[in-house]
Image (cartoon, rainbow, N blue to C red):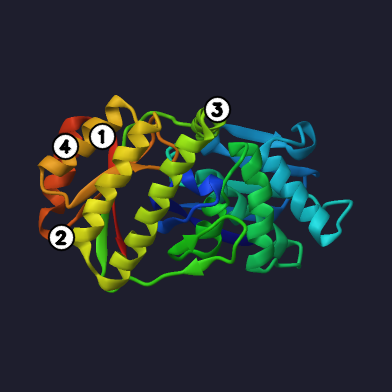
Amino acid sequence: MTTSSAPGKIILFGEHAVVYGYPALAVPVTQVQVKVTVSGNKRGGVLIEAPDINLSAELSSLPPDQPVAAVINSVFSTVGISEPPACTIHIQSTIPVASGLGSGAAVSVAVLRALSAFLGHPLPDEKVNLLAFEVEKLHHGTPSGIDNAVVTYARPVYFINKETIKTFHAGAPFLILIGDTGIAAPTKESVTAVRKLWQTDQTRWEEMFARIGEIVRDARRAIERGDNFKLGKLMNANHAILKEMTVSCAELDRLVTAALQSGALGAKLSGGGRGGNMIALVEKENAPAVARALEIAGTKRTILTQVG
C-alpha cells in the first residue's frame, strides 16, 4: 500500500492575465488537502473510490478524457505498464471543488505520486508537474499551469507560463483569510469568457493584463520587503481590474467589502471568479473580526493560512 497527499492552493495575484503570458503569485494552502491511497485488491481490475466527488468505478468503464481516468492512465503509460496490476485507488479530499483552491490539480498530483510509487517507479517532481498540467487541460481548457506548479512543489511561486518556476520568500510572515462564497465556479467557464472578451478587443484587454502584470511584480517586491500595507493596496487594485473583466460577482464583491470594512489590509477575489473564493490580507489581532464579518456577509467557510 502507498499513500500520498497534496495541498490546496490559492492565487494571490495575477489570475486570468497569467494565461496570456503575464506573471502570477500563488501559495499552497496546507489546511486543506487530497490524500490518495493505493492498495492491491483480489477483485481484479483498477478500482477507483472517490466518495468526495461521487466517483466509484472501474477504470475501464470511464472515458479516457475523464480527469481521474486520464491521470491514472498517464502513470501507466509513463512507467511503461500495459497490463496494470489489480489495485484500488482511494481518493479523499477536504478541498472544495470548483472554488479556486486547486482541487483538480491536488487530486492529479496525489494520484500520480501514490500510484507511481505503488508500481515501483516513483515519479520526480518535474514529471509530476508536467503530467498534472496535461490533466489540468481537461479541467480548465486553457490552464495557466500555476495550479499544478504550486501543488506539486508545495511552496510559494512566482509563475510565468512556459518559463522556469521561481520560488519567492516573504520578508515577514503574513496571514491570508480565505472566504468561500459557496458558489461552484468552474475555472474553464470564466477563462473562456475572458478569452472571448480578449478576442473582440485585444488591445484593450492586453493593456489590462499588462496592468495586472505590474501589480504582480510590485506585490512580489512588497512580499520580499515584508510591506503588508503596500500588499493590501495592490490586492484592492487587482480586484478592481478583475471586476472590469466581469469575473467578479455580487457575492464576491460583498465579501470583499465586508473584509475591508472590518479592518482587512486588502481583499480581492482569487481564482477564476464568478463564485469560488475571495482572500483578505489580515493582521493576527483582527483576523477573528474579519472572519466574523465574512460569515455575516454570507461566506460558507473561512480558512486562515500563513505565508512565510
- Which residue is drawn at the image coordinates 64% and 52% (left, top)? 132
Q: Position of residue 77 (x, y in %)?
A: 82, 54
Q: Nearer the viewer, mark 3 or mark 1?
A: 3
- Which residue is drawn at the image coordinates 33% and 27% (left, top)? 249
Q: Nearer the viewer, residue 185 or 103?
A: 185
Which quarter of the rendering shows the N terminus?
bottom right
Q: Which residue is mark 3?
A: 196
Give amino acid for label 1.
Thr
Asked if the residues shown at circle 1 and circle 2 are in contact, with their CB atoms under 8 angstroms apart, the answer is no
**Residue 258's mark?**
4
Q: Is residue 86 left or right of residue 283?
A: right
Q: CA distance from mark 4 to mark 3?
A: 31 Å
Q: Residues within 10 Å of mark 1 (few under 14, many from 20)?
A: many
**Residue 299's mark?**
1
Q: Is residue 95 visible?
A: no
Give amino acid for label 3.
Lys
Q: Which residue is mark 2?
A: 284
Tag 2 or tag 1, which sits nearer the N-term? 2
Which quarter of the rendering shows the C terminus?
bottom left
Tag 3 or tag 4, which sits nearer the N-term? 3
Tag 1 or tag 3, which sits nearer the N-term? 3
Asked if the residues shown at circle 2 and circle 3 are in contact, with their CB atoms under 8 angstroms apart, the answer is no
Q: Residues within 10 Å of mark 3 (few under 14, many from 20)?
A: few
In terms of secondary structure, where does tag 1 sit? loop
Asked if the residues shown at circle 4 and circle 2 are in contact, with their CB atoms under 8 angstroms apart, the answer is no
Q: CA distance from mark 4 to mark 2?
A: 17 Å
